[in-house]
Image (cartoon, rainbow, N blue to C red):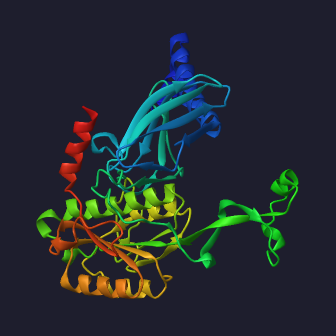
Amino acid sequence: MLLWLAGIAAFLFRGPFIYFIFYLLLLIWLVPPYLLRKTQSSLRIYRDTGSDAMFFGEKMTVKIKVENNSRFPLVWLKIKEACPRQLGSKGQSKINWVISLKPGETRILEYTLRGSRRGAYLVGPCQMELGDIFGLYKTKLEVQLFDFITVYPRVKPIEELGLTSLQPLGNLRHPQKIYEDPMKIAGLRDYQPGDPPKRISWRATARQERLLVKEYEATMSLDTMVLLDLDTNAYNPGRFEATKELAITVAASLAVHLDARRQAVGLATNGVAVAEASAYSDFKTLDNSNLENLAPRKGQGKQILEALARIEATPKAGPFLDLASRVKSRLPWGSTVIFIVPRDTDDLMTFSQSLVMSGYRVTIITVEGTRYREYLGKASTSSLLIHQVREEDEISALERKREA
């Protein structure tokens, strides 16, 4: 409207000042939108998280790279980065910047994510708003730029959890030669008729000038299965959140402990998986099926941590002992079964004793209290043990004392 009025005034009065105002307004009307279109088409934005996962309590630096590949300056650019409030500083779900870019300039913007709660998160999208120098024209863009971040559960050394006397896990020496472990050489002996050629140590034979064969240690590989009870109804309502997270911490710590020692470990729980939280939605149940598919295997510590990161307790969980019975049918003889439960109930003790009678080794770890205290502090060679883990605040106090 103002441009039309200036044009009519210039046509009627034909003065130099009126012409100047008219052409100035025409310039302001035509040039800024043109420059915005050019810079918008040449604007590039990238996000670099450095990793797709972090442990509980850690920090992650996120870098936003903005490039102005046009020949024109971008005088005003507002960037809004969407991130889940559980990861943002002070519960923020948006991080804002206002910058300007010269022709061909690249800027690196940084912010920090904090792993203040375990879970799976979606970072993004990224919104941008471009403006001209006069503030008359604005263009809004939403870049569908997403990154998935997993926050693993808290992991602690088993000594801090009071599990220093855990029974032997993994490989045990066995007196019968049928359990020889070809990865562990006990020594060399002279060749005897009937020894397979693949056992001959050719290097030692050449050195000693007589046929020598390898003797292997007799070991038996024991798989370890961790069963985690996440039935909401089994926990004390007044301490539910703390003890539930403590149970998950124990499971994660055991998985990391065993995986670091290259032992086969698996996980089963009656909890349910939850979908990713984002800046626009919180956690929600992904499905109602129990997690039973992580059979004991070496080298799957990361998969177990990822499962524990996005698992949640539910009041609709199936009976824990039904889950344990199904898992038992798939475990090889001699496996170690670790129950992580709120309390050691009569039914659980009866089931555990039946497992022992069937040739399994059982450890029960309670996070709320222990009834069968006669099983506490037994020798680590016992086939049935009970451990009671400290409350989370006691563990934190122990950490602070050690760091002081």
Between residue 336 and residue 191, name the one nearer to us.
Answer: 191
Of all residues, the one furthest to the top in this rendering is 16
Q: Residue at x 24, y 60 (%)?
A: 389
Q: Residue at x 17, y 72 (%)?
A: 374
Place residue 206 in its image quadrant: bottom right
- Which percent across, then down, holds residue 352? 31, 82
Residue 138 seen in the current view: no
Q: Is residue 57 above or below residue 236?
A: above
Between residue 237 and residue 142, name the one nearer to us.
Answer: 237
Residue 237 seen in the current view: yes
Residue 133 in the figure: left or right of residue 56? right
Q: Is residue 368 above or below residue 108?
A: below
- Which percent across, then down, holds residue 316? 27, 81
For the C terminus, give its image quadrant.
top left
Between residue 177 and residue 264, name the one nearer to us.
Answer: 177
- Which percent across, then down, holds residue 221? 54, 71
Q: How many marks?
A: 0
For the N terminus, give its image quadrant.
top left
Place residue 354 in its image quadrant: bottom left
Q: Residue at x 36, y 87 (%)?
A: 357
